[in-house]
Structures are given as C-alpha cells and as structure tokens.
Amino acid sequence: MTELTHSYSSIKMFENCPLRYYEQRVKKSVVDPGGEASKHGERIHKFIEDRLRTSQLMPQEMATYEPLVRSVEQLAEGNNLFVEHEVTINKSMQPTGWWDADAWLRSKLDILIVHGEGSTKALVMDWKTGKRRADPFQLQLFAAQVFTHFPTVQEVKTTLVWLKENALDSNQYRRSQAPALWEDTLSRIARIEAADSKNVWPAKPSGLCNYCPCKQFCDYAKR
C-alpha cells in the first residue's frame, strides 16, 4: 500500500475519478499545471492574503475586493484572525504540523476568526473564484478541523464566499456534531485506502474529462 495523505481537494479528486487520483497522486505520472482560471484564483488568494497580513494595498485590478477585506477586518476586530491557516491531523486524529512526518489530513483555512471570551465561537471563510457549486462536505470538514484544533470552540460557522457572484453558502455546526462530521470524512478516506489496498482505480467519465491531465491516454477522454 501507498502511504497516502489527504486533503479536501484530494478526497474530491478521488470521488470525481479514481483513475485520475491514482495517476496524479499515487503513480505521479501526470501533473496538473492548472488553467488560466485556476492561476487567476491563486492570484486573488495571494493579494487578499497580503492585504490582510500586511495592510498592503491591492492593485487596481483587485480593488473590487477591498470592501470584502474591510468586512473581514471588522469581523476580526477584538478577536483572533488567522489568514491562510494550516491545520493538520495525524492518523490518531491528533493535531500535528503541516510538514511533520505523521501529517495525514491537511486543511488550509483562507480565513479563520475565533470569537469571544474563552474562544467559544469561530468563523471560517473560503474564497471561491469559480462557478458556484456549494459542497457541504468542505463546510463540515473545515468545521471538524476547527473543533479538533481549538478545544474551547463550541460553535463554528463555515462559509464559502463566491467572489464572482457575490454570494455565500454557509452552515453552522456545534461541537456535539463533531463525531458525525469526522465519521463522514473518515468513511470517504476509507474508500480511497480500500482502492489503494486492492489497487483498483476505475475511471469515472464526466464533463471534467476534457480538463483532466490524464486525457492524453485515458480512453474515456478520447471518446
């Protein structure tokens, strides 16, 4: 078996197509260079990060996001603000470092605000630059990570911020839900590790095939 590590994006890659997951993350026969849209999204993330970390002014092309950044600053006033915050657990479900040898499941939170006396409430925000396709799994995974890394937090609101459409998708979670949130996440990971143990990675054709780095050799993409 391969020593696999996991993240929201890698879990979704497997669910979208096990064959791509195998070629890209296990066999490492392909690299996804990313299209212009993904590179644009990375630039937006970086400019917002720099603006919040250093108060560095954003370039004119990004000025449309200034009101959003100011709203984050207002929400964070008097609270703890974490930008591009890395949270990682090991197989024992204990917090560990992003680059530690036992890192097993990594999540990066674009914005984390821990509120209140005793840090009982938290807000997670994730910037989305593509088309609006809300995924409850991402919302719940980020909430579960916060509960694990911040033991005093009792309530987490997680929000996907769709920058193109100026829209939000949110869910609110209480600590009592954490076991169920982790159960769902672990069941998804178990399916990946079962595929690895059996070395069975079926292709799963979809509308994503034309954008897949495996399309040059995958029979489904050629149809």
Image (cartoon, grey):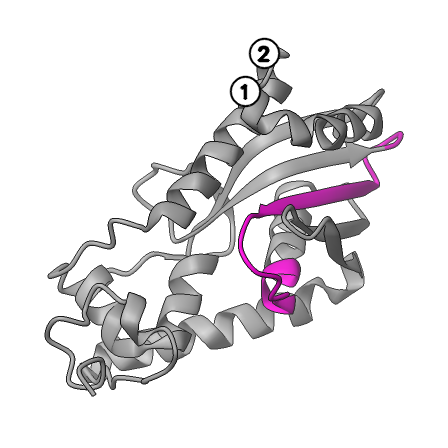
Q: Which residue is mark 2?
A: 56
Question: Callout 2: 10 Å neighbours few (<14), some, many (20+)?
Answer: few
Q: Position of residue 43 (x, y in %)?
A: 45, 33
Would residue 127 be counted in the magenta stretch? yes
Q: Is residue 48 rendered to the left or right of residue 213? A: right
> Would you place residue 219 above or below residue 135 in this image?
below
Q: Which residue, as the protein is rendered here, is positioned at the far right?
A: 117
Q: Say above or below: 121 vs 193.
A: above
- Quick check: is 179 in the magenta stretch? no
Q: Is residue 15 left or right of residue 119?
A: left
Closer-to-camera residue (223/196): 223
Which amino acid type is marked by label 1? Asp
Residue at the image position 64 percent from the left and 46 percent from the top: 163
Q: Position of residue 131 (x, y in %)?
A: 57, 60
Q: Label 1: which residue?
A: 50
Image coords of residue 130 (percent x, y): 53, 55
Q: Is disc 2 in contact with disc 1, using a CB cutoff of under 8 Å?
A: yes
Residue 9 sits in quarter: bottom left
**Horizontal side, residue 152 vs residue 94: left or right:** right
How much space separates mark 2 and mark 1, taking CA atoms?
A: 6 Å
Residue type at numbered disc 2: Gln
**Is disc 1 placed on a helix, strand or loop?**
helix
**Mark positioned earlier in the residue sequence (2 or 1):** 1
Magenta residues? Answer: 116-140
Residue closest to the far front = 60
Q: Nearer the viewer, residue 201 or 73?
A: 73
Residue at point 24% right, 49% down?
A: 33
Q: Is residue 63 visible?
A: yes
Quarter of the image that includes the C terminus: bottom left
